[in-house]
Image (tube, grey):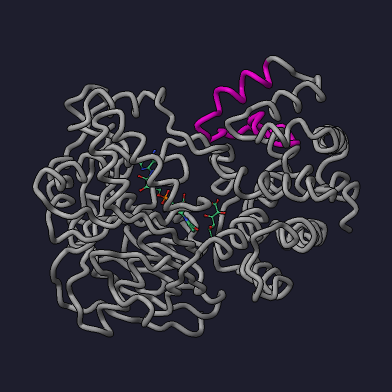
């Protein structure tokens, strides 16, 4: 490593104006970095953060507390240039999930810090609540956005709204307390990779509130702001190699995160209770986030998912290794320029060919060990916005989607839980049980297996599933894939 820049955190600590749900790697490497830079430059200490984990992550919460909430972000421009940034804007951390360390699954071991979190969110000091709880954390039907009322955790929050276990449930209870106390609602800013993410978050919250109190639901819908945002920074889950690499740079920090140097945040400027002057740190405050969201979700994330499923079936481990293959890189380029860039809703003023080139450069960053299995996770929650909505638009315009059809075929084969060489892996997806049953039921009957997956209307829009050209293309790609492997399947698409 030839060039290491170290930036220490400002000593000041101040008022907590933001609560964040989802104390994960991305929150620590993206939003918290913008806030740290903002505080260091402006001296404004009204926007400290209290972050909460609702799932997993109790150890991280306790470790951050023990470290005085300070941690490091390693921003890798490439394998020779890294910025080590100390972050101090997080000033409280909570855990509200089930503490699995107890080994028991009773109510007593859920919600250790729930009351502290809800009290914090109900305080008038809290003016903004942000979220990175993953696409599945909103409990919405991925294809059409309705609340999954039958989910056991949502059913719990309907039955016991004062002791919520889900992100929507926590938002509803906190907003209910503010309304009862005559305090204006905080702004809710979703920072997850979902289309129209503020509106979808609002839908989850209002639909859940309506199960409890129609007046509360109306108040939230009328008074609370749910702006949308597009977020972008590649932040892989930490690996042992990352920890070792940081130690070699003198950073002994179990709570550190690594990411690329690139970072982008495009935010709909609708904050009735105010916000930090993020624009001074390069955040783009806009009236309409949609074109930026569409471009990023379809071109970056759609490409990521293509790499993830095709690469994982070949036993490839990381994005860097996958995109180093000429045929996969050519497939990505064709997918981005022909199938994604031509779908409606893209930003008019952006050079999409240049954007595609920039994405391939980012994917080839050899200092990030971005595991394909991490990207492959939760495909049922990701593929509608990354591939399926765009594919429907192209088919309706009379165009074909061979790259997307191959991606869907690879995703279906991926859900069998083993790669093309027989190596098994876990399928991490809320619908993995359904996938297992479909593979069990259809076995080697490729056509009916594919059709059964396309009939999953929680994932695949019915209009797409019923499109004869699409189903046929997926079946054909699936057959080539399982007989000839990814090289033959990509060749059959005609991208090389
Ligand atoms: P992570 O695995 O480090 O953290 C996941 C977070 O989600 C944890 O705080 C976990 O407690 C929470 N979570 C998971 N399931 C939940 C549920 N059902 N209810 C409530 N909370 C739940 O992952 P990371 O990297 O922080 O990514 C989180 C999200 O951030 C992604 O799903 C995506 O939407 C967004 N994002 C991530 C990027 C990245 O490169 N890692 C880049 C852009 C966006
Ligand atoms: C990735 C995203 O895990 C995934 O699904 O595609 O987290 C990706 O790294 C980010 O959206 C990049 O901004």
| Picture quadrant of residue 427 | top right
| The furthest residue to the top | 441
Q: Nearer the viewer, residue 437 or 293?
A: 293
Q: Would you place residue 334 above or below residue 433 in this image?
A: below
Quadrant holding the C terminus? bottom right
Q: Using the rendered view, name the quadrant where residue 175 is placed.
A: top left
Horizontal side of 492 relative to 348 (left or right) equals: right
Q: Is residue 419 magenta?
A: yes
User: Which residue extends farthest left?
Assistant: 181
**Residue 51 falls in which quadrant of the image?**
bottom left
Question: Is residue 290 or residue 223 the one in the foreground?
Answer: 223
| Residue at image coords 54%, 60% | 290
Compared to residue 193, the image places residue 458 above or below, namely above
Residue occupying the point 78% across, 43% down: 406
Q: Is residue 12 left or right of residue 240?
A: left
Q: Main SS of the magenta segment?
A: loop
Give x and y (percent) for residue 142.
53, 38
- Give residue 67's position: percent from left, percent from top: 20, 61
Q: Does any portion of residue 239 appear in the rendered image? A: no
Q: Please state which of residues 308 and 148 is positioned toward the viewer in this rendering.
A: 148
| Magenta region, residue range | 415-440
């Amino acid at each position: 490593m030839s060039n290491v820049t170290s930036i220490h955190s400002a000593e000041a600590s101040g008022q907590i104006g933001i609560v964040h749900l989802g104390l994960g790697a991305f929150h620590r490497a993206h939003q918290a970095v913008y806030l740290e830079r903002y505080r260091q430059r402006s001296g404004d200490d009204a926007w400290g953060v209290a972050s909460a984990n609702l799932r997993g992550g109790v150890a991280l919460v306790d470790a951050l507390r023990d470290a005085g909430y300070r941690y490091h972000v390693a921003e890798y421009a490439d394998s020779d240039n890294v910025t080590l940034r100390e972050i101090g804007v997080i000033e409280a951390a909570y855990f509200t999930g089930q503490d699995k360390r107890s080994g028991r699954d009773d109510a007593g071991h859920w919600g250790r810090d729930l009351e502290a979190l809800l009290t914090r969110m109900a305080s008038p000091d809290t003016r903004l609540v942000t979220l990175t709880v993953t696409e599945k954390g909103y409990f919405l039907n991925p294809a059409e956005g309705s609340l999954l009322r039958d989910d056991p955790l949502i059913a719990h929050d309907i039955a016991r709204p004062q002791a919520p276990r889900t992100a929507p449930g926590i938002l509803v209870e906190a907003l209910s307390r503010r309304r009862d106390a005559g305090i204006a609602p905080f702004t809710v800013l979703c920072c997850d990779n979902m289309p129209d993410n503020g509106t979808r978050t609002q839908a989850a919250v209002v639909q859940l509130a309506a199960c409890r109190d129609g007046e509360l639901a109306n108040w939230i819908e009328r008074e609370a702001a749910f702006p949308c945002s597009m977020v972008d920074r590649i932040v892989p889950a930490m690996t042992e190699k990352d920890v070792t690499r940081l130690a070699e740079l003198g950073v002994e920090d179990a709570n550190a995160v690594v990411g690329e140097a690139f970072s982008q945040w495009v935010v709909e400027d609708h904050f009735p209770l105010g916000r930090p002057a993020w624009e001074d740190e390069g955040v783009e405050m806009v009236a309409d986030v949609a074109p930026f969201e569409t471009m990023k979700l379809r071109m970056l994330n759609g490409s990521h998912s293509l790499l993830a499923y095709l690469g994982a079936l070949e036993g490839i481990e990381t994005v860097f290794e996958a995109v180093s293959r000429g045929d996969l890189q050519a497939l990505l380029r064709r997918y981005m320029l022909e199938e994604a860039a031509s779908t409606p809703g893209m930003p008019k003023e952006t050079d999409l060919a240049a954007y595609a080139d920039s994405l391939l450069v980012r994917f080839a960053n050899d200092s990030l060990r971005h595991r394909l299995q991490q990207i492959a996770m939760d495909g049922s929650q990701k593929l509608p916005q990354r591939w399926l909505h765009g594919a429907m638009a192209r088919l309706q315009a009379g165009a074909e989607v061979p790259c997307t059809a191959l991606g869907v075929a690879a995703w279906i084969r991926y859900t069998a839980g083993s790669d093309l060489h027989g190596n098994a892996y876990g399928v991490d997806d809320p619908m993995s049980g359904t996938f297992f049953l479909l593979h069990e039921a259809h076995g080697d009957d490729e056509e009916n297996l594919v059709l059964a997956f396309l009939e999953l209307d929680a994932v695949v829009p019915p209009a797409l599933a019923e499109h004869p050209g699409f189903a046929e293309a997926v079946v054909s790609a699936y057959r080539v894939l399982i007989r000839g492997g990814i090289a033959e399947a990509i060749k059959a698409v005609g991208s090389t």
